[in-house]
Image: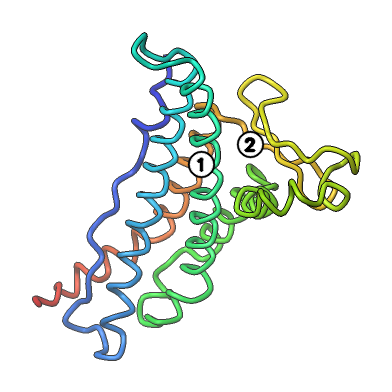
Amino acid sequence: MAPHPIHRLPDVPLICPSVLTPAEELAGVKNLHAHLHGLRFSVEVWHAGLLLYQTSKAPPASIPRDVARRWRFIAANECILELYHFREQLEKVQSVVLRQCPSVRPFVDMPLLREARKRLEEHFPDAEAMRHAAAHKGENDAHPEVHAPDSCLALSGFREPDRYSLPYQGKLSHLDMTDASLGKLVEVLAMLLGARPIADRELEGQGHLED
């Protein structure tokens, strides 16, 4: 049996300035390390949301059924927002953070980093639309003529098993609340972290700068 996706979650190695890191890049290298930890944390939060959703399907006897049903929506909305946050952080690492430390950038596998971002878009093509639908649910409900695919009802919900659907600008987007979706996020994070082992070794070989 294959291990559960969360058991494949990679660790973030220590990335800190070396004795050769230019003074103007010290904050940038630390910022890179912080963002990589932030990306890993987003996957952990997504896992927590998924566990809440799965618990809502078979709640303890002490939890009223109507409360458990609401948990499904709380969990799905949290996963949607955290997925968008992961997507935005990945884009920032690629387009902003690495530019703050040009001495490190040559040692990062940029094609693999771009592939990680591409893979995320392939796995979750509706991420942006779902975020807007979840964050502006009241507006969507008030204007079904704009957001509902049938121009009549703009209701979010589970129309299919484990699939949360949301209308936005005339299109129905969805997120699968499954271990498979978690596995896709873990896959992207592993690719992202795999883009910089050479940079890690280079900084360590130069000698870490002691704060």
Res 107 → quadrant: bottom left
Q: Quadrant of the C terminus?
A: bottom left
Q: Name the residue under label 2.
A: 175
Q: Locate residue 168, reporting x and y percent.
A: 76, 49
Q: Which residue type carries mark 1? A: Cys
Characterize the local packing of mark 2: few (<14), some (14-19) or many (20 or more) Cα atoms within 10 angstroms.
many
- In the image, 39 versus 153, the foreground residue is 153
Left or right of 119: which side holds 98? left
Left or right of 96: which side holds 33? left
Res 208 → quadrant: bottom left
- In the image, 45 versus 76, the foreground residue is 76
Outermost residue, top direction? 61
Q: Do the residues labelled 1 and 2 touch (CB within 8 Å)?
A: yes
SS for dot 1: helix
Q: Locate residue 98, reporting x and y percent.
A: 43, 75
Residue 79, disc: 1
Task: Name the residue rendered at 62%, 52% in the picture.
Answer: 131
Task: Name the residue rendered at 71%, 54% in the picture.
Answer: 139
- In the image, 52 versus 193, the foreground residue is 52
Q: Quadrant of the N terminus?
A: top left
Task: Name the residue rendered at 53%, 23% in the picture.
Answer: 69
